Amino acid sequence: MQTTHPNVNAISDLATGHGNDATPFSQQSVVLTKQAYIELTWKANYWQAQHARSVEREAALTAQVASLEATIRDLTPRLSGTQSEKSAGPDEAAEPQPSRPRHRGQQPGSQGQGRSERSARFVVPAGHDVRPAQSCGPACGEAFAPLPGAEASTILAVQVPAHLRRIQRRRDHQTCGCPQVPGIVPAPPAPRVIPNSPLGVSLWTTVVLDQDLSGRPTSRFCEQLTHHGFPLSPGTLTEGLQTIAGLFAPVRTTL
């Protein structure tokens, strides 16, 4: 039972602010039962604990949002492409910006980036002969004499054929009478990243570089392999990456 006593001096004297600065509620006292006091105390402790959990949860979510934003900042340049590493000189940086918008592409009078160096690439020679109708005189039919040398030009090509490596293991059989020797002695099996897996080292290297450098999803990488005539399930690559994750532990410790 709750009772209000507006003129209980013994309790009102203990209230803070008694006197000229007293508030209206400081002049009143409330008498509660023991059960009501216990219930109010329990509810106060309960909501204080809930508030503390909410504060901890908010701090964890804030840290998670900050981590995701950092990941977005890291992946955005990979998606849009890296900018040119050539920086403008001091004279170019000091030039005022034009008032009219610039056209896209290389601007007239700019220095440009120049041609990319490809001299270290592997060269595959390919010959193109003159057509038979053009290698002789149209009226007399006499064949033309070839000039020394050839007119050279370069075409940049990429050829990444997906193929199967057929491993042929040599086997020897015993022809002597030595004891403790098996009847058939085969050559050791070819090295594999995952035992008994048909996926070779070059394929796993391509998968790791494609995901870490390009950030391309596994499903799109499998679609590209399908175009090369090498269908592969995304689940196979995902399970294989989880299996070989322990191989990169020394790399993480050095970084």
Image (cartoon, rainbow, N blue to C red):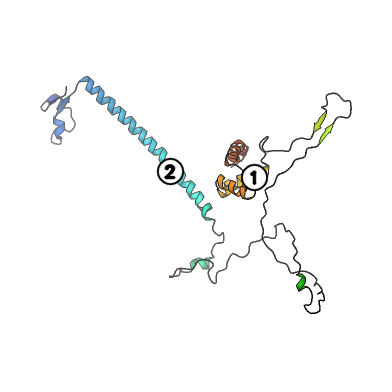
**Residue 174 position within the rendered picture, expressed as x and y whole percent measured from the top left:** 86, 29
| 162 up-or-down from 53: above or below | below
Judge by depth and name the residue closer to the eye, 201 or 17. Answer: 201
- How far, Cα to Cα, is label 1 from label 2? 32 Å
- Kindly give the residue lying farthest to the top in the view shown: 34
**Residue 62 position within the rendered picture, expressed as x and y whole percent measured from the top left:** 41, 41
Judge by depth and name the residue closer to the eye, 241 or 110. Answer: 241
Q: Would residue 68 appear left or right of 89 to someone viewing this image? A: left
Determine crowd level at label 2: few under 14, some 14-19, many 20+ residues with C-alpha closer than 10 A.
few
Q: Amino acid at mark 2?
A: Val
Determine crowd level at label 1: few under 14, some 14-19, many 20+ residues with C-alpha closer than 10 A.
few
Q: Quadrant of the C terminus?
A: top right
Location of residue 52 (image quadrant): top left
Q: Residue at x 39, y 36 (%)?
A: 57
Judge by depth and name the residue closer to the eye, 212 or 49. Answer: 212
Residue at the disc numbered 2: 65
Mark 1 or mark 2: whose residue is earlier in sequence: 2
Location of residue 245 (image quadrant): top right
Q: Amino acid at mark 1?
A: Thr
**Residue 118 position within the rendered picture, expressed as x and y whole percent measured from the top left:** 67, 60
Q: Residue at x 43, y 43 (%)?
A: 65
